[in-house]
Image (spheres, rainbow, N blue to C red):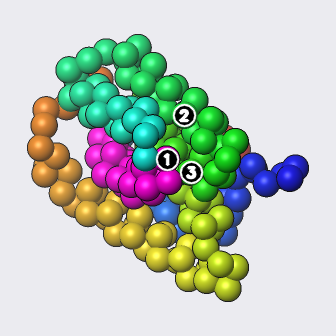
Amino acid sequence: MPGQRKILYSRKSACIEPLRLLIEEQTHRTLVAWALECASRPLAFFEGRVACELRPREAVNRTYLWAQGEIKMPEARRAILAAHKAAGEAGRIDLCAEAAARAVGHACATVHAATHALGLVFYWLTAVARNTAPEQRDLREQEELAWLTERLLYWQDHIENWNAPWAAFLLREAPNQEKLLHERKG
C-alpha cells in the first residue's frame, strides 16, 4: 500500500523532543556508546523476524571494531550499507523488520556522524509502532523512549565504562553535530 513504507517519526515529532534535546548535549563518544548498546533491541527484533539474515549483526560487529580503531571506515561503511540493503530486502515482506534493520544501520552510522543517532530512534519507534496494536502504541512509544533516554543518561554519566579503546578520531573533541544541525534549521 502506498505510504506504508514511510518512517513514522522525525526531528519534528513532539514525543522525540526531550530525547533530541538530550542528544544535542552529548559528546560523539557518548552517542556512539549509546547507539551501539541500543542497537541490541532492534537487532534482536529483526533477527527474530528474519533469522537467517546476518548483515545487520555484522554491521554492529564491524562498527564496534571501527569505533575502537581496529578497522578503517570503508570496511565498516560496507557493512553498514549491507545492513541497509538487508533492510530493503526484508521490507518487501515485513515492514517492521525493515524499520528495525534501518535502526541498526543508523545506530552503526552514528560512529561516522552523530546526526545518525536520531535515525536509530526514528526507525526503532517506527518498527515498534507498526508491530503494536493501535490502542497500545502510545504506551509502547513512551516505554521505548524512556528506555532510550535512560540508556543515554547512563552513558552520559559513565562513558568511562566503555570497555575498549577509542579510535583516534573519536578522541577529538568537536561540537555536537545534531545541535549544529538544529541551530542551522532554526
Q: Nearer the viewer, residue 75 or 185?
A: 75
Where disc 1 sits, the SS reads loop
Q: Which residue has dot 3 on it?
A: 97
Stretch of the chain drawn in magenta: 29-50
Q: Nearer the viewer, mark 1 or mark 2?
A: 1
Main secondary structure type of the part rendered in magenta: helix
Q: Which residue has dot 2 on it?
A: 86
Q: Residue at x 30, y 41 (%)?
A: 29
- From where the camera sits, is residue 130 visible? yes
Q: Dot 3: few (<14), some (14–19), or many (≥20) neighbours within 10 Å?
A: many
Where disc 3 sits, the SS reads helix
Q: Residue at x 65, y 78 (%)?
A: 133
Q: Residue at x 60, y 46 (%)?
A: 98
Q: Nearer the viewer, residue 46 or 158?
A: 46
The three-letter code of the residue at mark 1 reads Val
- From where the camera sits, is residue 17 visible? no
